[in-house]
Image (spheres, helix red, strand yellow):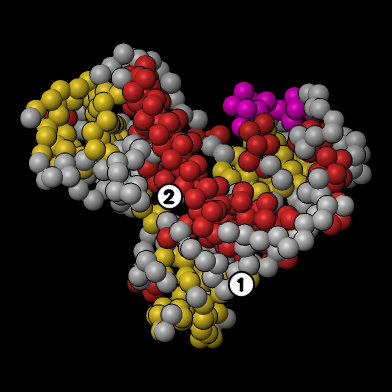
Amino acid sequence: MSQTSDVVVIGGGPAGYASAIRCAQLGFSVTCVDKSKNSSGKPTLGGTCLNWGCIPSKALLDVSHRYDQMSKLETMGISAKNSAIDISKMLEYKDSVVEQLTKGIGLLFDGNGVDFVHGVGKLLDGRKVSVTMADDSVDEIQAKHVILAPGSTPIEIPAALLDYEYIVDSTGALEFNTVPERLGVIGAGIVGLELGSVWGRLGSEVVILEALDDFLPATDRRIARDALRIFKKQGLDIRLGARVTNSEVTDGTVKVSYQLNNEDQVLECDRLIVAVGRRPYTEGLLADDSRVNLDERGFLFVNDLCHTDAPDVYAVGDVVRGPMLAHKGMEEGVMVAERIAGQKPVVNYDTVPSVIYTLPEVAWVGLSEEELKANGEDVTSGMFSFGANGRAIAADESDGFVKIVSDTETDRILGMHILGAQASELVAQGVIAMEFGATAEDLALTMFAHPSLSEAVHEAALGVSGSAIHAVARRRKS
């Protein structure tokens, strides 16, 4: 059966569903093709983020945080003796959150007139898309425009081959039906830290092996240093410069061989999570004559506007250059939809926020002070500690700080970096400020509610000029 559609979107994750919905809002006929199935074997929308990534991991992070806090409430006068965690109910809660949100996308598709086809999509020449159904039948759709949004998949490494029981990827780490007594994690990046935190709060002895010598190299150096100290204090055993060479399972125990400080060592654990990053998922996506090219790292090659080398074919999300973040992919999807409609939006890649949902959270937007100075920029920074913030102290969340970096000459904000409670929410103030080209003085002259965590942003902005009220200002040379 042959069909036609103004726009065909391959992929129903954040980048794909956002572009499909926006195209439909703009009056196009839209077909979204996605092959994903949930644990019951039924078609599901939302991609990795909603089904096996961002959303379920945040549900478990929130549950584990509340459980962990119960043991720390005595100082507030709250007795929480004999607290317990029911892992099966926790997983049921996680699944209910996922189901609610994935069904919500289906309702949005129905409400906007997006046609959803469950199958495997492949781009052919001339903007034709073949769709292989579950029964192996093949349909073909002729499109005027095609948007490729197939997403990404976890990277596998030869030194720790997955068996999906004892050695798992990030998806498997969301499904443990018991709390591992000893948990190993390969990779101290965002995923490794978040999943390590979940099971560590629930009682696992967590060891994280990180091949790099630097902790969180993409973040501000002071934030990385303080975060490492805090995470270790929480019980995460983070070993930097640990290069895994082999893993094997013997009698239900995972033995991980690694090198640290030029010495061969072995870690024994009950479960091992491999969290070393993700790669673009392009298997079976492109026919030989599709005219879409890949770059040297395996990403689909696109220009600044997400246009591939093939006419009227776009690619967005994890499969193209830039950070693999759901919000970045969604913005690209919306941009492409509006450009197809003749509008002229662009994505500002200088204001893409990044977040690590540990406790405290780590969030940043723009470049760090170290990066800017390495680029030859003359910058000035201001910092303010949550340890001097009334709301943070009252909530017993005084770890961390806010740092704002601005151009010394123009005072324009070039970066905001936060370690602390609700950093994921607070960093949006930096995103908005940078999007509007605000200066540190602009934030300093803005009124913030008292008491609030946001005041730390205000004080950091004041600190750029040495004018912070609730911190001793550094002396400036006359």
- In the image, is residue 442 part of the stretch drawn in magenta? yes
Q: Residue at x 72, y 39 (%)?
A: 404
Q: Earlier in the sequence, mark 2 or mark 1?
A: 2
Q: Residue at x 39, y 25 (%)?
A: 108
Q: Could you tell me residue 220's position as x and y percent?
A: 65, 51
Q: Could you tell me residue 179's position as x and y percent?
A: 55, 67
Q: Front-most of 130 and 82? A: 82
Which segment is the magenta one? 430-445
Q: Residue at x 51, y 77 (%)?
A: 269
39 to 272, vertically: above or below: above
Q: Which mark is residue 307?
A: none
Return the residue at label 2: 52
Left or right of 256? Residue 223 is: right
Q: Residue at x 37, y 66 (%)?
A: 164
Return the residue at label 1: 205
133 to 304, vertically: above or below: below
158 to 25, vertically: above or below: below
**Res. 102 visible in picture:** yes
Q: Secondary structure at mark 1?
A: strand
Placement of the C terminus among the 4 image quadrants: top right
Q: Front-most of 354 and 12? A: 12
99 to 183, vertically: above or below: above
- In the image, is residue 465 part of the stretch drawn in magenta? no
Q: Could you tell me residue 34's position as x and y percent?
A: 27, 39
Q: Amino acid at mark 2?
A: Trp
Q: Secondary structure at mark 2?
A: helix
Left or right of 411? Residue 180 is: left
**Res. 122 visible in picture:** no
Left or right of 328? Residue 436 is: right
